[in-house]
Amino acid sequence: MISLAQLHSQLGSDLRPAAGGQVAVRQISGVHISELDDPTPYLEGGELLLTTGIPVSGGDAKVQAYVRRLVERNIAALGLGLGAGVDDVPPALIAACASEGLELLVVPDGTPFMNVSRAYWDLVGREGQADLTASLGTQTALARAATQPDALPSVVKALAQALGGWVAYLPADNGAETLWPADNHTMVEQLRRETSRLDMAVTHSASTFQIHGTDVVEYPVLVGRRAVGFLAIGAGRKLTRADRQIIMTVCVLLSLKAAQQQESDATAAALRSAVTKLFLTGHVDAGRALAPDLGIGAPTGPVRVLVVSGETDAAAASAELESRLRAGTGWTGWPQAAGALRSCRLRHVAGGLSYYLLDAEHDDAGTSGNAAGATPADPTDVAAGTSGNVTAVLSRPMPLERVHDEAGQLAAMVRALEAGQIVEVPAGALDPRAQGWVAALRGYQRADLIGTVRAYLRHRGQWEGAARELGIHRNSLRHRMGIAAELLQADPDDPDVAANLWLALRWV
């Protein structure tokens, strides 16, 4: 805002104190001209009021009442124009202004009030231009910081330096915060609690609260309608309009960076999914040839196939599985399972199931083959915030060339499990031919050979019991089993064939 001292400096002798001396350094909100006895209904407070003296031409009581009304309305100063209404400043007016503490200025004869108004607005324009220049300079610096490789720390630091306070960025997923000054960690937990208490992720509105007696302003950073983070500022002073414009600029910059990162992550996930699909469908050489061109580390050793159902969000499901494994509620035969899952970057979704190719030789202390070039996420315990309905089957170690042959069996297994179960298939559980046997039996249309063979194996080759369960004559059962043996090109009474066929049929 403009002060009386600035206006006096601009106008010189055209606006001078009535009693001489220095003009008070008092801010004014505008310049207003009125000859009304009571102009206060048309004033907001803070103005320099100009008059030719008509309202103060009268007795001392009238002058005193006039000045008192101006003071009660919080008028910044009274400017008396000489020559039109009065030639000299009335002593009663000087006394009344001195008594009430109202600054009294004089506009000499021959100086139009327009000069005073024009000088005021010239100063306003000049100050606004200076603010704009400073704001643009700061916003340019912020935009430049946003293009740096470490964009988030650079932007947070630039904003804190521009405001002369501290700034914190808190990701909405409870990830690591970004602070400036970097050692200002004492208030992070309180910031998170206030964010949660105010439901900022839901309301999408800015909030103000106090921490350690300091006012804190917090803004949500949105991508679409979803809050991806929160920007907290402690400036230690009242924020100006220019400050708030700079803060909103930072919110927009962070929003754009977050949207870009989401698009980049989605593209990378799609590329990894394409490579994973090649491995799952048996095109191993094509997958290995394509992976390096896409910046993806293909497995160099054996893998384990993890098939998951019940996923609504891949990140949440993976975190739930990892949490359950670390808590001992999953399989225990492979201690590195949780670490391999966290480092896994090869995932493909098909038929309502998610397929993960895990490095079977994963070492938590080292770098896994299929996570080359990837940075594992920080551990997150989300068991308390998930449904527990994620269901999974983990295969034994196998070369990539075997993945295509066993993926179908694993998918059938996970669909047969109850919600929330996690099962590890023991090493050597199924004959490699088992999937083909099941497919051959399923393909026969004239009778239910799947049910027939399952009943036959359940009764350990006893014709009477199996026929009774199926509700058919034992000769019909013999006929069906003969057809099944021809389709299998194997003897169902062979112990190895029977064992593997029984395990395969359990999941169908």
Image (cartoon, grey):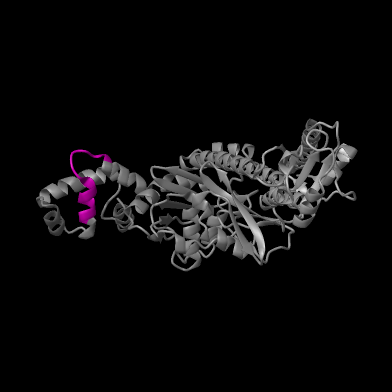
Q: 477 or 166, which lies in front?
A: 166
Count the marks: 0
Is 416 placed left or right of 35 in the picture?
A: left
The percent position of residue 304, horizontal first and vertical second, equals 49, 54
- Let me know if residue 457 appears in the view: yes
Res. 303 visible in picture: no
Report x, y in % for residue 349.
45, 43
For the N terminus, the image quarter is top right
> Would residue 76 be found to the left or right of residue 177 on screen?
right
**For this rendering, which residue is in front, 190 or 9?**
9
Residue 34, picture quadrant:
top right
Compare residues 113 and 396 and report the one nearer the observer.
113
Span colored in magenta:
443-456
Q: For residue 384: magenta? A: no
In the rendered structure, does residue 455 fall within the stretch colored magenta? yes
Per the picture, the main secondary structure of the magenta-coloured stretch is helix
Q: Position of residue 42 (x, y in %)?
A: 63, 40
Q: Is residue 374 left or right of residue 54?
A: left
Q: In front: 340, or 91?
A: 91
Rendered image quadrant of residue 479: top left
